Image (tube, helix red, strand yellow):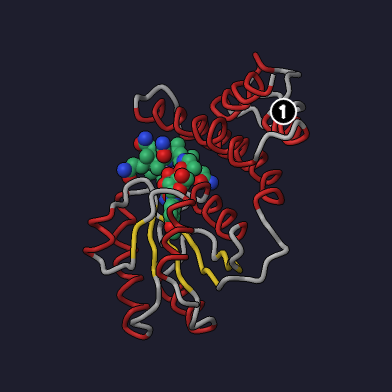
Amino acid sequence: MSEDKLKQLRICIERGKGTQAAPYPPDMKDQPGARELTEQLLAEGVAAEKILNEALIPGMREVGRKFQNNEAFVPDMLISADAMKKAMALLKTELANSNVEPKGTFIVGTVQGDMHDIGKNLVAMMVEGAGWEVIDLGVDVSADKFLNAVEQHPKAAVGMSALLTTTMGAMKTTVEKIRAKFPNTTIIIGGAPVTDSFAKEIKASGYAPDPQGAIELLEGIAVA
Ligand code: B1M
C-alpha cells in the first residue's frame, strides 16, 4: 500500500502535480497530489527519509534526465520543483529534532548566480534535524553576504551549494573571501556538478555528495 503511494508520489513530483486541487497536469485532475500523498504516507508511519529517498529525489532526478534529453523544459522543472516543495514543507517538521541542544551553527546558501534551492533546502533541513542551528541565506548569495554572516557568527561552519557548472567559480571566490579573514572556518561544498577534487582545488574543507554526507563532514571536522 505504502509502496504504491511512494510510486504515485514519485510520479506526482515528476509530472508536477502539487495538490489534488491543482488543475495541472489535466490527465491527473482530481487525483491526490504531492501534498496529499506525503500527508498520507506520514500518517501511515513511513519515515520522512524514505519518502525523500524513494519518491521525491527520484522524481526530480527523472525530470532532470528528461530535461537533458529535451523531453521536458524549464516550465516542467518549475512545476516539479513546486510539487517537491509542497512535499518537503510537510517533511520539515519530521526531519527537525527540536529537543537537542544545537551542536553548532551552520550557515548555508546557494552561491551567486544560482537559483537552485531544492538540494540546499534538503541539506539545511537534514543538518537542522541533526541538531545544528541553521542560518539559511537563500539563493544567489554573494561572497560578501556569506562573509557578512561569518562575521556575525565567527564560530559557524559554512555550506555552499551550486547546481550549475557556471556557478562553481563563485564557490572559489567565496572560499577565498572567507579564508582571507577566517582561515580556519569549516567550509563544505556540494551540488550535482561539484566534486571532491574541486573542493580540494578551491581549498574548501570538504565535499559532500548528499545531506547525510554534509552532516558527517560537519560532525567530523567542525569545532563550532
Ligand atoms: Co536547472 N539545471 N536550470 N532548474 N535543474 C539543472 C541543474 C541541470 C543539470 C538540468 C540538465 O541540463 N539536465 C542544468 C545544469 C547543467 C550544468 O550546468 N551542468 C540546469 C540548467 C541548465 C538550468 C538553467 C540554466 C535552464 C535555463 O534557464 N535554460 C536555469 C538556471 C537558473 C539559475 O540558477 N540561474 C535552470 C533553472 C531551473 C529551475 C528554476 C527551473 C529549477 C530550479 C527550481 C528550484 O531549485 N527552486 C531547475 C531544476 C529543478 C533543475 C533540475 C531538474 C533538478 C535540480 C534539483 O532540484 N534536484 C536539475 C537536473 C538534475 O539535477 N537532475 C537542473 C533535486 C535535488 C534534491 O538534487 O540539487 O543535486 P540536488 O541536491 C542534492 C545533491 O547535489 C546534494 O544534496 C542534494 C540531495 O541529495 N547537495 C549538497 C546539493 N547541495 C549541497 C550542498 C552540500 C552538500 C550536498 O553541502 C553544503
Residue lying at the far top in this picture: please name it: 27
Q: Residue at x 45, y 65 (%)?
A: 218
* 213 lies above or below 22: below
Disc 1 Cβ-to-ligand 1 distance below 8 Å: no
Task: State whether residue 4 is above or below residue 195.
Answer: above
Amino acid on which disc 1 is placed: Ala
Question: Disc count in the image?
Answer: 1
Residue under pointer 1: 22
**Residue visible at 57% across and 26% down in the picture:** 10
The spot of residue 187 in percent (x, y) is 39, 69
- Residue 149: where, in percent of width, then height? 51, 77
Quadrant containing ligand 1: top left
Q: Quadrant of residue 7?
A: top right
Residue 45 vs 104, above or below: the answer is above
**Residue at (71% x, 18% y) in the render:** 29
Say which quadrant the N terminus sits in.
top right
Where residue 97 appears, x then y in whole percent? 68, 58
Closer to the camera in the image, 149 or 154:
154
133 or 25, nearer to the observer: 133
Helix, strand or loop under label 1: loop
Q: Quadrant of residue 134?
A: bottom right
* Vertical arrangement, residue 9 with respect to residue 192, above or below: above
**Mark 1 neighbour class, 10 Å CA radius: few under 14, some 14 to 19, many 20 or more:** some
Q: Position of residue 120 (x, y in %)?
A: 50, 53
Q: Nearer the viewer, residue 4 or 62?
A: 4
Asked whether, in this view, residue 4 is left or right of residue 70, the answer is right
Q: Is residue 15 left or right of residue 22?
A: left
